[in-house]
Image (spheres, rainbow, N blue to C red):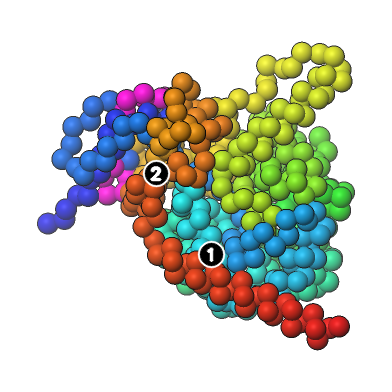
């Protein structure tokens, strides 16, 4: 006889992000065997009860683009522009990364996500210097219990070889091996994508080979486009259109320097958009194009990108996007001496962007992104009694503009509690030790290489 595992989240302020359910100021969420089965007031059930009085319940945040492998070198490039990043990170640290460093980075990085209420992650893993590297990345993601799309990327042993009109495609045989070994089903917590460099960075032959490979394997594609002084001029989407490669299976990351034609091409092809606002404003990619994406009927998502240079939580990204977008519009209206438009971004839109929109962009909206019966139970409880959140007037504003990582009290992924009473249930001590050892190993290897080259 099988036992049903039931959990009842009682008396929380539920922000379901499901238009049919709406907000429930005193609502319950019933979870059975990892699935949400009811969201309503006063649910009666024989279940483990978690008292959510004074808590705001939201769907888990979705980070649609993070180079998780960079966790051991957190903060190594605080003042970097995008151009600097290529040299300071991809040409300095990436070539000396071993599989053990990727494992440590993905372990600590995905625990960091869970701690911050990020329950779904697109891991943009362009560190596959050997076949052991992707295995290490996937193993670490699996051990933490996060929901993730592992996006297999290129090696990064040389800027010249991999980023300047590269003639080297990702190794198809190894991508097929990883697909078969780790992702034979698309129904698990972990799914697979392809992280491709795209036109401007690679020859057309490589671009076409990588797009073909992803489509042969039935996995989504994610690519950086339209960013910064250099890559903003490539017209990458237009080039992809010229190659006949645009499709609804592709996520375009950054999109800061798109022509109007490129916005239309992405929208018309059913593509999706990931925006990393703190990185984009800080590192010179361009203004985060949140409203631009919305104007073209797209549903933008947010992402962290690199912890070498910015914090790894979604609260930072929400505020960076909200502030930057409104600053841009306010400045334009001041210049033109016109009132601000009614389409100014709102706090509720920001919450949609980091939950249900994120799930849409990650290709997982059928599974997560809202507190909807039938979806998997990815739920975050925010402590609204904390001094930096109380007193509660507008719960959406509390989450988007007041709360921080310290207020993330409970995190549930696929019905499993991963953080309880403000404490991660994973082995944080081991993860920190491994990531510190990796930092020491990497910085020593970079120093030794520098001496050899001097």
Percent x, y for residue 390? 44, 28
Q: Is residue 303 visible?
A: yes
Percent x, y for residue 441? 62, 78
Classed neighbour count for the residue bearing mark 2: other residues with Cα under 10 Å, few (<14), some (14–19), many (≥20): many
Q: Which residue is mark 1?
A: 106
Q: Is residue 133 visible?
A: no
In the rendered structure, the answer to whether residue 141 lies left or right of residue 308 reads left
> Which residues fall within the magenta stretch?
22-35
Which quadrant of the figure contains the N terminus? bottom left
Please report the residue visible at 75 percent of the width from the left and 43 percent of the height from the top: 281
Find numbered disc 2 in the image and state the secondary structure of the residue it sits on: strand
Find numbered disc 1 in the image and state the secondary structure of the residue it sits on: helix
Q: Which residue is mark 2?
A: 409
Q: Which-is-in-front pick, marks 1 and 2?
A: 2
Percent x, y for residue 399? 50, 33
Please report the residue visible at 56 percent of the width from the left and 70 percent of the height from the top: 436
Check the image and report above or below for 260 versus 194: above
């Amino acid at each position: 006889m099988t036992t049903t595992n039931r959990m009842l989240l009682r008396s929380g302020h539920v922000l379901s992000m499901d238009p049919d359910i709406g907000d429930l100021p005193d609502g319950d969420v019933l979870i059975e065997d990892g699935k949400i089965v009811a969201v309503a007031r006063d649910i009666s059930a024989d279940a483990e009860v978690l008292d959510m009085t004074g808590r705001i319940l939201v769907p888990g945040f979705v980070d649609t683009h993070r180079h998780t492998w960079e966790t051991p070198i957190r903060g190594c490039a605080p003042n970097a522009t995008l151009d600097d990043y290529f040299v300071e990170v991809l040409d300095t640290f990436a070539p000396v990364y071993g599989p053990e460093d990727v494992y440590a980075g993905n372990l600590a990085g995905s625990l960091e996500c869970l701690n911050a209420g990020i329950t779904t992650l697109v891991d943009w893993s362009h560190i596959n210097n050997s076949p052991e590297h992707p295995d290490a990345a996937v193993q670490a993601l699996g051990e933490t219990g996060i929901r993730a799309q592992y996006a297999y990327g290129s090696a990064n042993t040389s800027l010249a070889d991999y980023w300047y009109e590269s003639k080297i495609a990702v190794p198809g045989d190894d991508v097929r091996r990883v697909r078969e070994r780790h992702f034979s089903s698309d129904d698990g917590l972990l799914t697979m994508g392809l992280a491709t460099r795209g036109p401007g960075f690679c020859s057309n032959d490589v671009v076409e080979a990588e797009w073909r490979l992803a489509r042969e394997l039935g996995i989504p594609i994610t690519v950086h486009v339209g960013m910064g002084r250099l890559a903003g001029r490539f017209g990458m989407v237009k080039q992809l259109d010229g190659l006949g490669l645009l499709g609804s299976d592709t996520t375009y990351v950054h999109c800061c320097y798109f022509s109007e034609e490129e916005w239309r091409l992405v929208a018309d092809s059913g593509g999706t958009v990931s925006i990393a606002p703190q990185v984009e404003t800080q590192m010179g990619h361009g203004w985060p194009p949140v409203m631009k994406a919305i104007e073209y009927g797209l549903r933008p998502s947010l992402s962290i990108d690199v912890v070498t240079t910015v914090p790894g939580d979604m609260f930072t990204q929400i505020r960076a996007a909200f502030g930057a977008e409104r600053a841009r519009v306010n400045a334009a209206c001041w210049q033109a001496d016109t009132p601000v438009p009614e389409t100014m971004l709102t706090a509720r839109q920001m919450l949609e962007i980091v939950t249900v929109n994120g799930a849409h962009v990650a290709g997982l909206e059928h599974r997560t992104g809202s507190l909807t019966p039938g979806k998997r139970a990815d739920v975050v409880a925010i402590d609204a009694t904390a001094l930096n959140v109380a007193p509660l007037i507008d719960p959406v504003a509390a989450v988007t503009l007041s709360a921080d990582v310290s207020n993330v009290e409970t995190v549930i992924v696929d019905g499993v509690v991963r953080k309880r009473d403000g404490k991660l249930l994973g082995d944080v001590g081991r993860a920190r030790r491994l990531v510190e050892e990796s930092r020491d190993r990497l910085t020593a290897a970079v120093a030794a290489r520098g001496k050899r080259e001097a």
